[in-house]
Amino acid sequence: MFYGEYQHALDSKGRVIIPSKFREGLGERFIITKGLDQCLFAYSSEEWSNLEAKLKMLPLSSKDARAFVRFFLAGAAECELDKQGRILIPQNLREYASLEKEIYIIGVSTRVEIWAKDRWEEYSSSENLNGDSLAEKMETLGV
């Protein structure tokens, strides 16, 4: 399980150190792809297999389902940790998430998310992530 929030920096080649607490759960090789909210999602091989299985169950006849599958799979890349615990984030994914220098790496249960610093700070501001209003919305989902 992944949790926590870490601030890191991309180097000039597009590499970033993965927090040590996340390395064991992700493994030496893992998948990174476009995520929702214009961040990146990183999955261990096992969790990626689980996601792929769910995506395969979506009806091919549904235009929205096909688009959703393409969104996650077309931009996906396998990453491998180097000896310093870094990965190279592919250029297309850096562009999608607007990653420049300062980034946040956060744990979200079964996945890790990588955010541009300014986007994460805006998203996680008290106006967007108000615990009381979120709790009320989650109640309608049975949480």
Image (spheres, helix red, strand yellow):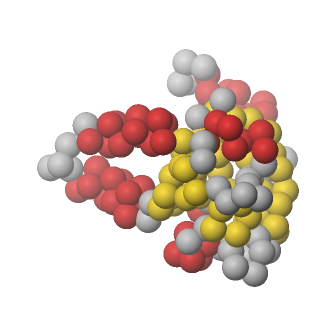
Q: Is residue 133 left or right of residue 64?
A: right
Q: Which one is nearer the viewer's eye here, 142 or 56? A: 56
At a point 33% along the width and 53% down the height, the residue shown is 69
Give the quadrant of residue 88. Answer: bottom right
In the image, 98: left or right of 56? right
The furthest residue to the bottom: 12
In the picture as drawn, the residue positioned furthest to the front comes out as 83
Q: Nearer the viewer, residue 98 or 136?
A: 98
What x and y, as percent, mark residue 109? 64, 33
Residue 142 vertical placement versus 77 (above, below): above
Quadrant showing the C terminus: top right
Image height check: is 41 above or below 57? below
Q: Residue 140: x and y, percent?
A: 55, 24
| Quadrant position of the N terminus in the picture | top right
Whether residue 50 is visible: yes
Image coordinates for residue 102, horizontal then vertical, percent: 82, 68
Number of numbered discs on residues: 0
Q: In this view, does 134 lie above or below 69?
A: above
Residue 117 appears in view = no
Q: Residue furthest top?
A: 142
Q: Which residue is drawn at 61% across and 42% down?
A: 26
Q: Work out whether residue 104 or residue 87 is closer to the camera in this orientation and state it.
A: 87
Between residues 19 and 131, which one lies in front from this camera angle?
Answer: 19
Q: Where is residue 139 in the image (x, y as percent from the top left)?
A: 61, 22
**In the rendered view, does 36 fall on the left or right side of 133?**
left
Instruction: State left or right for residue 139 relative to residue 47.
Output: right
From the viewer's perspective, is residue 21 above or below residue 72?
A: above
